[in-house]
Each structure stands twice: as C-alpha cells, then as structure tokens.
C-alpha cells in the first residue's frame, strides 16, 4: 500500500490502513511529526514500513499533547511512534534529526541505519530483541540515554558516533554487543552494560567515571582499559574474566569485583579503603601486589570473604611485612616483600600498562608516542609507535620476564612484567 501524504492527512486515512491486508506500507509526500503519532496504531500485519520518501515537518500542537510534548522539530520521529507494532523492516528519511523516547521499542525491528541524528530519546530501541544491526556513524548525538538498547540481545553490530561522551543508566543492559570502542566517553552510568553477557572488550576515555554496577554480570569481559578513579559498588561483579585487575583510585566499593576470575590484583599507591565483599569469591586469585601502597588500606572484614586468604600471596614494600601482619584482614594473607614480578621503576600517573594473556595493553591520557619491549639484558625485542591514547603489543614468545617502556606526552613509565 502506497500513500502520498500532505500534512494532517495521515490520521484521517489510518482507518483504511488498518483495514488493509498489505504487509508493506510506503508513505511519501509530507507529514508533520504530530501526524506520525498515528502510526502507533498500525495493524500487526504491517511488517515493512518505508518512510524514505517522506518529508517530516516540525509543528506545534494547540489541542492536547503527545506524552507531554506539544512542539516538534523538523525531522523528528515522535515518542512511541511504532512501540509494540509488528514492523520488522524500516526505512527512514535521510533528514531524520531526532528519534523520540521509546519510538521503536518492543518491535521485531531487525536493522536500523540512519544518519544526521542529533538526539535519541530514552528507551528508543528498548526490548527490540531481534535487532541485529544499528548504525549511526554520521550522527552527532553526545549521549546514549537510559535504556536505549536495553534487552537488544541479538544486537551484534553497533556503530555509533565517536563523539558520544555519556552512556546512560541501563542503556545497553542485556544487550548482545561483543566489542565496542567509546574513545570520548567520560561517564558510564549505573548498570549501563549490566548483564551484557557477550561483551568481551570495551574501550573508553582514560578519565571515564563509572557508575554502580556498570559491568555487573558481564562474565565474558576480558579486556578493559581501567580508569584512574574509584571503583563503585558492583562495577565488575558477577564473573569478569580479566586475568589481571589493576585497581586504581582510593576506594573499592562494595562487591565491586565479586566472583571475578582474576588471578592477580594490583593495588594503586593511593588505595585507602576496600569495601565489603569487594573481592568476594575469586576462585583463581593467587597474588595481591600492594608494594606501591603509601599506606595500608582499610579493608572491611568481608572484603575477601569466600577466598582462602592463607593461600594468597600478598606482596608489600620492603621492610613493611611486620606492619601488614598486624593489620586486620591483611594479617591473614601469606605476606612477603620479595620480588612480585610487577615493579614500577619509573612512574607517571597517566600511563597504565596491563598484561592480558598474550598481549600487553597500554592506556594513557596523552598520546602514546612509543611502546618498547626489552629483555633483562637490555636487548630490544619489539616496538610500536601508536600515536593514539590506547594500544596493544604482543607479549614476546618464550620470554619469562620483559621490560616495558612507554612514552606518552611528557611522561615515561617503565615496568617489569613476569
């Protein structure tokens, strides 16, 4: 069924559309955003909707409102426009600028590709369980709002504007995305990626702020560039598979890394407080490196509950073993000040080096000019010049100990990895 519209006509002809048995609906001509609210009442028989030839005009409603909205801009898809309909295939006009709150939620939509969008409303694609691909590469929105892709369990291919600076609460919870790079994101809010069980790798700005439970229940996560701030409660709880936890900031929140699969924990020099169940039930945990800590962190009695701490090695500064043996919680570990295998020999606070299996991952707040790997006798093994704020380099084969030197901005950091 093909209809050429003029502003105000769509609500008038909706009864005839509802009576039609056609599964494909093509709308051309011009309509206001307010007119498009009538599509909320499409029959479930319509599985394909083509709006590519439609001009969407802004308008102001003088009688009533649409979910509290009376003013619409040019190119705006109204809130809840297709919510709960049977539309699987959708073509949008190239001039779409705004996608309203819940506009396509709870539909069997399989793919969306749109350019020029400057704003997306909360829950725009919530519970679109069949959505496999979403492309917004030429869009300019700065935020992925709350619940945008919540429950999109089939979503594998997600391409969004690199300018995104914020991921809202529950925005990608229970989403099927596997890898995502958000280089400019400065804030990931509460439970933004919670239970995104297929997520293996994510990148974000070095100084990104994480919310409570940001990656809660993400059991497959094996590569993440950590931020320098505090770790909020439940941030990585539920079984993250990162082997080495390089824990930054002054505080680790309640249950932050509970049930993770790491074998090694490194505590930052500034660490002051570790909350209840922060490192609860970590079956692979063998070592904790606290050799750079300026002071002994206060640890809740249950901080390491569920672990046999008497079998876990705790590496501390030379000459401070007795101090740690008198500290509550810490005194139950196997404390030593011998070689830990991770010694920072030259430190700047804005460079981070992580050993992730066969790769060495580097992140910095400044552009990384070079990464060089050396043997203990000073022989250069390999080097790269990333000219980016994050990079990876392969751990040399058949090498037990490697010296890593990173230059970024005006800083340099050298570590020995074992």
Image: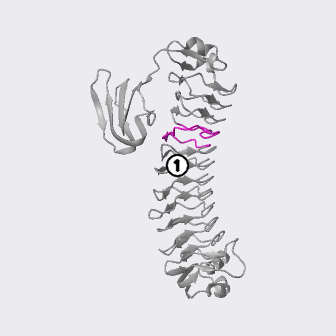
Give the colour scheme of this rendering.
one colour
- Quadrant position of the N terminus in the picture: bottom right
Q: Relative to residue 194, is residue 229 depicted above or below?
A: above
Q: Relative to residue 31, is residue 405 depicted above or below?
A: above
Residue 31 shows in this picture: yes
Q: Residue at x 60, y 30 (%)?
A: 282
Q: Quadrant of residue 280?
A: top right
> Which residue, given by chain and number where applicable, does mark 1 sit on?
186
Percent from the top left, x then y, of residue 68? 70, 71
Q: Which residues are magenta?
A: 216-241
Q: Is residue 410 left or right of residue 336?
A: left
Residue extending furthest toward the front: 410
Q: How many marks?
A: 1
Q: Is residue 143 magenta?
A: no
Percent from the top left, x then y, of residue 189? 60, 49
Q: Is residue 219 magenta?
A: yes
Q: Quadrant of residue 236?
A: top right
Q: Magenta region's main secondary structure?
A: loop
- Of residue 100 and residue 294, the one placed in the foreground of this image is 294
Q: Is residue 14 left or right of residue 185?
A: right
């Amino acid at each position: 069924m093909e209809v050429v519209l003029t502003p105000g006509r769509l609500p008038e002809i909706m009864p005839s559309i509802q009576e039609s048995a056609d599964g494909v609906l093509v709308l051309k001509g011009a309509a206001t955003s307010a007119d498009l609210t009538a599509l909320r009442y499409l029959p479930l028989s319509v599985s394909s909707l083509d709006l590519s030839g439609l001009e969407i005009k802004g308008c102001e409603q003088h009688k009533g409102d649409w979910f509290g909205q009376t003013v619409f801009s040019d190119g705006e898809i109204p809130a809840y426009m297709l919510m709960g309909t049977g539309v699987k295939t959708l073509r949008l006009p190239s001039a779409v600028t705004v996608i309203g709150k819940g506009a396509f939620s709870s539909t069997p939509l399989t793919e969306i590709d749109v350019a020029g969008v400057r704003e997306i409303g909360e829950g725009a694609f919530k519970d679109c369980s069949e959505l496999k691909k979403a492309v917004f590469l030429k869009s300019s929105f700065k935020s992925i709002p709350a619940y945008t892709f919540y429950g999109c369990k089939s979503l594998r291919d997600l391409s969004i504007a690199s300018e995104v600076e914020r991921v809202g609460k529950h925005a990608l919870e229970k989403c099927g995305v596997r890898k995502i790079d958000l280089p400019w994101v400065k804030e990931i809010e509460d439970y933004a990626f919670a239970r995104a069980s297929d997520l293996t790798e994510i990148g974000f700005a070095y100084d990104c702020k994480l919310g409570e439970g940001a990656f809660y229940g993400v059991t497959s996560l094996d590569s993440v560039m950590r931020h320098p701030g505090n770790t909020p409660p439940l941030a990585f709880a539920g079984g993250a598979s990162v082997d080495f936890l390089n824990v930054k900031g002054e505080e680790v929140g309640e249950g932050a890394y509970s049930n993770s699969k790491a074998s090694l924990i490194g505590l930052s020099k500034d660490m002051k407080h570790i909350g209840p169940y922060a490192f609860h039930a970590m079956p692979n945990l063998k070592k904790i490196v606290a050799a750079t800590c300026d002071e002994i962190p206060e640890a809740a009695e249950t901080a390491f509950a569920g672990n046999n701490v008497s079998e876990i090695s705790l590496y501390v500064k030379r000459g401070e073993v007795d101090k740690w043996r008198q500290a509550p919680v810490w005194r139950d570990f196997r404390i030593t000040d011998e070689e830990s295998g991770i010694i920072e020999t030259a430190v700047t606070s804005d460079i981070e080096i992580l050993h992730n299996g066969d790769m060495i991952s580097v992140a910095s707040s400044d552009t990384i000019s070079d990464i060089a790997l050396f043997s203990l006798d000073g022989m250069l093994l390999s080097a790269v010049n990333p000219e980016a704020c994050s990079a990876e380099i392969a751990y040399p084969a058949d090498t037990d100990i490697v010296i890593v030197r990173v230059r970024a901005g005006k800083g340099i950091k050298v570590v020995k990895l074992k």
